[in-house]
Amino acid sequence: MALYVQKFGGTSVADAERIRGVAEQVARCRRRGDQVVLVVSAMGKETDDLLRLAAEVSTDLPGREMDMLITAGERKAIALVAMALEAAGVPAESYTGSQAGFVTDTNHRNAKILEVGAERIRAALDAGRVPVVAGAQGVSTDRDVTFLGRGGSDTTAVALAKALGADACELYTDVSGVFTTDPRVVSTARRMHAITFDEMLEMTAAGCPKPAMRSVEYAHRHGVPLHVRSAFTWEPGTWVVEESSDMEAALIRSVVADSSEAKITVSGVPDEPGVAARLFRDLADADVNVDMIVQNVSEGGVTDISFTVPHTDLDRAISVCESQSAVSGAQKIVSDHRIAKVSVVGAGMKSNPGVAATVFEVLASHGINIEMISTSAIRISCVIAEDSADQAVQVLHDAFELDATTF
Ligand code: ADP
Ligand code: ASP
Ligand code: MG
């Protein structure tokens, strides 16, 4: 008898019919003799709807109330899923994050898990019931309801799998696994049978939404077997695994695009020690999440610094720069939110020179201008204009023949 933690994303429980589909699948697993714990996201786009509603009544969006609001989406979904399971003949019981034993820090809207006391979930399993746990939520050390952040349900599932010693954590979603690139953008994208944690982490850091980055980190740290698969066809999907000796390191495994960031350029900054330190310290203190940073060669004692931040942090970042420029004497601050970061990821590039050159040549031959570049040992990222992003992904995917590669 195996124990699986199965997480269903918003699309997978978007309406009554889909919820009944999930219940039938769980009933099949149980007939095979497996034990199942479910983790469920809010239905469809409900989290976005709740965020939009909040913005209509408030400009400062207080964290405590925001978390109370957002977590309501998952709470509604778990009750409906538990009822559908009962209707399908499967004894089930819904649990909020707090009831399931998730204790978090007090950082509202992006709380971190401190502890998972899964005794109630274990007891429900032992009693033959299927626990249905609300994703992305917990209770803080101050006893307030907390939200784990966007995509947090993946993290809930992995943490629960670890706490229960489950055989695998299965993330069911609206595509059939992790692909060589977003299958909604490139129709020839291929599903991978397996991918290493290192490559998966680079993909998520580059902007791949699935699985959520924190869940991959958690699974990697705690050795949780992770399986991304389809809630529509139920076919086997992609395993995220430690590197194994029979795994050939692919030169390039995937292409990722991310349009969620904006670029800020502070020009005419005095080129002297401490300027960058002050600017980025102030940005960090204002909770601005800086990604890429480029500083130009200085001319006449001044230089330009460009960096990218999430769209959601842009206004805050600009006001930090404005108050800084008074101190540092910067001449101009410009921002551009219509950028995209396009990245290629693959462990094989560590031992093969020329990948960066190929990326630049491919983009240049299609007239796509590169505004910024950053690299890690297994990733190359370029900032380009947002409206060229889909084309860039397509031509890089073609150039590295990812449509023809089997992993
Ligand atoms: P869920 O709601 O199930 O948590 P998400 O909507 O967060 O799922 O993520 C799934 C989506 O991620 C897919 O619909 C797909 O369009 C997108 N995606 C982007 N890049 C990839 C990729 N390389 N492999 C698989 N899915 C990807
Ligand atoms: N519903 C939340 C979101 O949309 C949490 C999750 O699905 O992981 O981000
Ligand atoms: Mg998601």
Image (cartoon, rainbow, N blue to C red):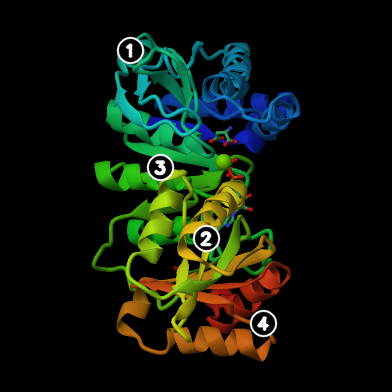
Which residue has dot 1 on it? 126
Compared with 109, 288 (above or below) is below
Which residue has dot 3 on it? 215
Task: Give how far across and how far down residue 126 sits, in percent.
Answer: 33, 12
Label 2: state its secondary structure.
helix
Q: Earlier in the sequence, mark 4 or mark 2?
A: 2
Compared with 6, 64 (above or below) is above
Q: Which mark is residue 325?
A: 2
Query: In the rendered image, is residue 223 in sight?
Result: yes
3 vs 4, front mark: 4
Task: Give how far across and how far down residue 121 sits, in percent.
Answer: 37, 16
Please name the residue shown 35% across and 61% down the image. Answer: 277
Give the residue type at disc 1. Answer: Asp
Task: Give how far across and how far down residue 70 sits, in percent.
Answer: 60, 25
Compared with 232, 390 (above or below) is below
Compared with 166, 189 (above or below) is below
Pick whichever, 303 or 27, lies toward us: 303
Give the residue type at disc 2. Answer: Ser
